[in-house]
Image: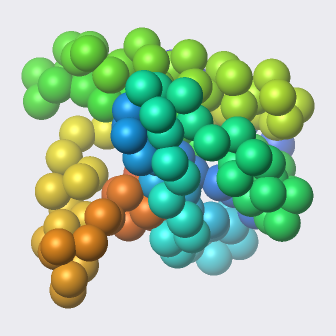
Amino acid sequence: MTNPTTLAAEVSGVLLGFDFGLKRIGVAVGQTISRTATPEAIVASRDGRPDWEHISRLFEAWKPSAIVVGLPMRLNGEPQALTQPARKFGQRLSGRYQTPVFYIEEQLSSIEAESRQKHRDQPMDDHAAQIILENWLNAL
């Protein structure tokens, strides 16, 4: 796991944050100057295969200097079923877009996103990605 504080001086500008899921992937956009993030998109994923065209459009639009991927972990800090697929997703992002990737352990970001969202009947994956990215930025 990359420690954000060790590379904080090297990372600046726009970042894309991802909340990986097998059906949907939440995406948020943030920046290092204000250390803020906003929900950006929900990318479809079929059987763990992301819509790479949609992700490519996001990279073209935002030209991020780095990627942050949330690693789902159990409350006790142990890996869970989605931990390795999320790590693999981050590696694919880095390889495809030649952009450094950082991981941050995350637990309960979807529950926190639900509590923030007014319309709980709508997918909140992009809001979970916002929380993941904000947590990474706040750790700098």
The image shows residue 80, relative to residue 63, as above or below, that is above
Q: Position of residue 83 (x, y in %)?
A: 36, 19
Can residue 3 be seen here? The reply is no
Task: Residue at 42%, 13% (x, y): give it.
Answer: 84
Task: Residue at 26%, 15% (x, y): give it.
Answer: 81
Most extreme residue toward the bottom, as rendered?
Answer: 118
Q: Position of residue 135 (x, y in %)?
A: 41, 54
Can residue 45 be seen here? The reply is yes
Horizontally, is 98 left or right of 135 in the view?
right
The quarter of the displayed image where residue 58 is located? bottom right
The image shows residue 23, relative to residue 39, as above or below, that is above
Task: Residue at 81%, 64% (x, y): give it.
Answer: 62
The image shows residue 93, relative to residue 27, as above or below, that is above
The tally of labels here is 0
Q: Position of residue 110 (x, y in %)?
A: 24, 54
Horizontally, is 39 left or right of 4 in the view?
left
Horizontally, is 30 left or right of 70 in the view?
right
Task: Residue at 49%, 59% (x, y): give it.
Answer: 42
Q: How is the image coloured?
A: rainbow
The quarter of the displayed image where residue 128 is located? bottom left
Q: Position of residue 53 (x, y in %)?
A: 75, 46
